[in-house]
């Protein structure tokens, strides 16, 4: 006979082992919550989303779908977004479903797969009488957004390589992992895709599956499946490993009230089960595990803090945006980039068929530049010496329609505040780079 604190559950065609004591402890964090929502999948098979209630009973939420995954709980705790497909031959689409029943409501209707949805914070513009809610998701390697009714589609990111695992944090910005650099890193953007910037470059490889805790840390999976974190306040200088190799393979953390995490873990050949993890102490307690399925993407079906709203400057009628730098000579490599080595800059287009002209622009004496470039097109900036040889380059970046995007320098310390001076290029009209037709 099993110990009394373990309950074998077989309900709604789902079978698993629930830890009754830990379920009770989780319920105390959110007494009005119906339970935990998670994804179940078999190796090589399709997946489904289930709700584990506080009695350990389990109910399939996505009956009628050929496959379903990526649950995301709403801020009021009453609904969830998920990615699903009704038939195996169809692309993945984004749906919304309430806990209290009813049919899933389809939000996207794209021809390509739409995955990993997240609720964004409220969006404000000067020409709209009321703010509105949006959903962001991943499709064809980029982040996209739509209103909850599926209207006003926007592509948000434009770097080649692939962006994935979006996460909306307390200040309303959206973090995500990206393969668009030499090694995968974490970046951030505003809700409309503006102000694209590096968020964290952790020492481990391939940061992904990030979750934000209430104590302002971002926890993520890295390398071969270990947990690590950085602070939201100093993400480039606060890396901390939370687990060590040999502790198992960790997967899809999510935040709990109080600072703990729900996270999936497997050891050896066992399936992934759901655990409660304390980032401060490393204490791990089993919550739920099905011997037949990998149980991942577990989230508490409860209200969570609403992130700050964000305004948007994007005007899709405008076909260009501005890109400026206060001084390329503000850099972390002063021997390579200085007044004697960097004289001009070259702007490369991410689309070889749409080269920009003029392709090269002189730096101002103080190292500043000010450009007008086509919106929504990946570009890369190279600093050139007198012979035209590149001495430094940035990764792929972009500007949105009507965005004014600026940087302090060339790979400068992002925690620095620039000198209080007027950059020469900024008081002049931007140099217009055009070519290749409409952006």
Image: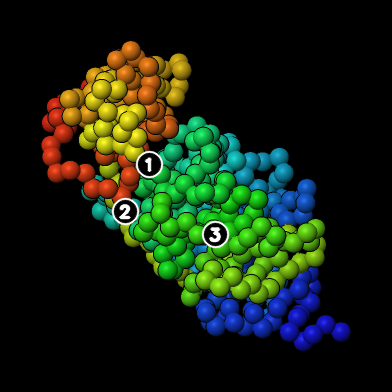
Q: Return the residue at label 1.
A: 196
Q: Horizontal placement of 45 versus 180: left or right? A: right
Q: Return the residue at label 3.
A: 241
> Of the residues tagged 2 and 3, which is closer to the observer?
3
Tell me how far mark 1 sits from mark 2, CA to CA: 15 Å
Rendered-image quadrant of the N terminus = bottom right
> Of the residues tagged 1 and 3, which is closer to the observer?
3
Outermost residue toward the right in this view: 1
Residue 286, percent from left and from top: 68, 73
Q: Return the residue at label 2.
A: 310
Above or below: residue 319 compared with residue 386:
below
Residue occupying the point 42% across, 40% down:
156
User: In the rendered structure, are the residues bearing label 2 and label 3 in contact, judged by CB atoms less than 8 Å apart?
Assistant: no
- Judging depth in this view, the residue of 182 and 212 nearest the camera is 182
Q: Secondary structure at mark 1?
A: loop
Q: Secondary structure at mark 2?
A: strand
Query: For residue 405, which quarter of the picture?
Result: top left
Q: State which tag comes first along the sequence, 1 or 3.
A: 1
């Amino acid at each position: 006979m099993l110990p009394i604190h373990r309950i074998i559950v077989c309900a709604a065609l789902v079978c698993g082992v629930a830890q009754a004591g830990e379920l009770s402890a989780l319920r105390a964090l959110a007494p009005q919550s119906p339970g935990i929502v998670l994804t179940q999948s078999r190796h090589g098979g399709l997946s489904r989303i289930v709700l584990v209630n506080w009695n350990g009973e389990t109910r399939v939420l996505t009956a009628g779908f050929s496959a379903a995954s990526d649950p995301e709980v709403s801020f009021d705790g009453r609904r969830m977004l998920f990615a699903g497909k009704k038939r195996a031959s169809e692309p993945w689409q984004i749906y919304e479903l309430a806990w209290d029943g009813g049919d899933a409501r389809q939000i996207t209707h794209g021809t390509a797969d739409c995955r990993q949805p997240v609720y964004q914070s409220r969006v404000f513009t000067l020409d709209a009488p009321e703010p509105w809610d949006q959903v962001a998701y991943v499709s064809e390697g980029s982040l996209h957004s739509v209103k909850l009714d599926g209207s006003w589609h926007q592509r948000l990111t434009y770097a080649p390589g692939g962006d994935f695992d979006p996460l909306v944090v307390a200040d309303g910005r959206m973090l995500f992992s990206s393969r668009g650099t030499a090694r995968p890193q974490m970046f951030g953007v505003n809700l409309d895709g503006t102000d694209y910037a590096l968020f964290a470059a952790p020492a481990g490889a391939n940061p992904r599956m990030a979750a934000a805790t209430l104590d302002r840390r971002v926890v993520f999976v890295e390398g071969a499946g270990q947990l690590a974190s950085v602070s939201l306040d100093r993400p480039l200088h606060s890396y901390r490993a939370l687990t060590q190799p040999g502790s198992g393979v960790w997967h899809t953390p999510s935040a709990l009230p109080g600072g703990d995490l729900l996270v999936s873990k497997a050891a050896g050949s066992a399936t992934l089960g759901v655990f409660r993890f304390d980032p401060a102490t490393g204490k791990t307690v089993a919550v739920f595990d099905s011997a037949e399925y990998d149980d991942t993407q577990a989230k508490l079906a409860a209200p969570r803090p609403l992130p700050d709203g964000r305004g948007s400057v994007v005007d899709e009628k405008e076909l260009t945006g501005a890109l400026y730098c206060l001084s390329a000579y503000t850099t972390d490599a002063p021997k390579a980039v200085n007044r004697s080595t960097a004289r001009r800059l070259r702007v490369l287009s991410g689309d070889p068929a749409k080269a920009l002209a003029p392709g090269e622009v002189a730096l101002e004496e103080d190292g500043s530049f000010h450009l007008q470039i086509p919106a929504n097109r990946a570009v890369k900036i190279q600093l050139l010496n007198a012979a035209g040889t590149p001495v430094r380059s940035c990764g792929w970046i972009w500007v949105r329609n009507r965005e004014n995007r600026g940087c302090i320098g060339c790979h400068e310390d992002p925690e620095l505040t620039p000198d209080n001076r007027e950059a020469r290029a900024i008081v002049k009209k931007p140099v217009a780079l055009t070519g290749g037709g409409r952006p």
